[in-house]
Image (spheres, grey):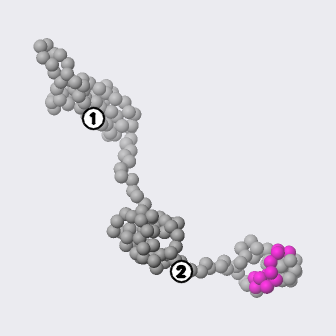
């Protein structure tokens, strides 16, 4: 079989240089019968590949059923097929399993935020500190802006809603206010 470039070369040598099939065959290193065949053709037609049945074809529906039931590895599929009479190679099974098994999706969602659009806040525990005659739990409030990674930290001795909202106000003042939305 020849490619399109060779077809054009044969047609050119015949039409513009007046060469016959045997002369063209010698020029392009092809069999004269091949050149004669292509001179008789008006258009180039690439060869259509033939579908040949393979050793794995009778087992393909079973492989799909196996993979739908349980996420077997290619080695496990090969072992089960061998038990059912498959005499082909492992690489053949592995290549087919790779084509029919759906690709794994990422187990997380990537988030993207514009500047000033999102922040994360949380409480943290720092341990105990002496306050007068007693010890109090020391907590800290943290706010991190997603886009710039700017961070605000404030220590408190309580985690009540009042302290939480006050820490928010202080953090926004530190960042220069609430971004326009």
For label 1, count other residues whose C-alpha is less than 10 Å away and answer few (under 14), some (14-19) or many (20+). some
Q: Quadrant of residue 173?
A: top left
Q: Position of residue 79 (x, y in %)?
A: 43, 68
In-front residue for pair 11/46:
46
Q: CA distance from mark 1 to mark 2?
A: 62 Å
Q: Which residues are magenta?
A: 27-38
> Do labels 1 and 2 touch, CB within 8 Å?
no
Residue for point 37% across, 70% down:
66
Q: Looking at this view, name the residue that lies furthest to the left.
A: 133
- Determine if the magenta segment contains residue 5: no
In-front residue for pair 120/66:
66
Q: Position of residue 37 (x, y in %)?
A: 76, 85
Residue for point 32% across, 39% down:
118
Is residue 59 at all visible to an observer of this figure? yes
- Tell me the quarter of the image containing the N terminus: bottom right
Q: Is residue 12 left or right of residue 111?
A: right
Give the residue pinned by disc 1: 121
- Determine if the magenta segment contains residue 32: yes
In-front residue for pair 121/168:
121
Residue for point 16% across, 21% down:
136
Tag nearer the camera, 1 or 2: 2
Q: What label sits on residue 53 in the rendered view?
A: 2
Q: Choose the circle earlier in sequence order: 1 or 2.
A: 2
Q: Position of residue 111 (x, y in %)?
A: 37, 46
Element at label 1 = strand
């Amino acid at each position: 079989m020849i490619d399109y470039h060779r077809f054009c070369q044969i047609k050119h040598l015949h039409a513009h240089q007046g060469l016959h099939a045997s002369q063209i065959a010698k020029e392009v290193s092809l069999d004269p019968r091949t050149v004669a065949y292509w001179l008789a053709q008006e258009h180039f037609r690439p060869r259509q590949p033939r579908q040949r049945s393979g050793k794995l074809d009778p087992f393909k529906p079973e492989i799909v059923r196996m993979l739908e039931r349980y996420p077997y590895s290619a080695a496990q599929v090969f072992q089960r097929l061998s038990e059912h009479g498959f005499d082909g190679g492992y690489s053949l099974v592995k290549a087919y399993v790779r084509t029919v098994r759906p690709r794994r999706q990422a187990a997380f969602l990537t988030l993207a935020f514009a500047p000033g659009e999102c922040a994360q806040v949380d409480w943290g525990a720092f341990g105990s500190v002496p306050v007068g005659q007693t010890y109090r739990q020391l907590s800290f409030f943290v706010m991190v802006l997603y886009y710039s990674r700017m961070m605000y930290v404030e220590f408190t001795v309580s985690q009540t809603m009042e302290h939480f909202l006050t820490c928010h106000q202080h953090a926004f003042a530190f960042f220069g206010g609430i971004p326009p939305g």
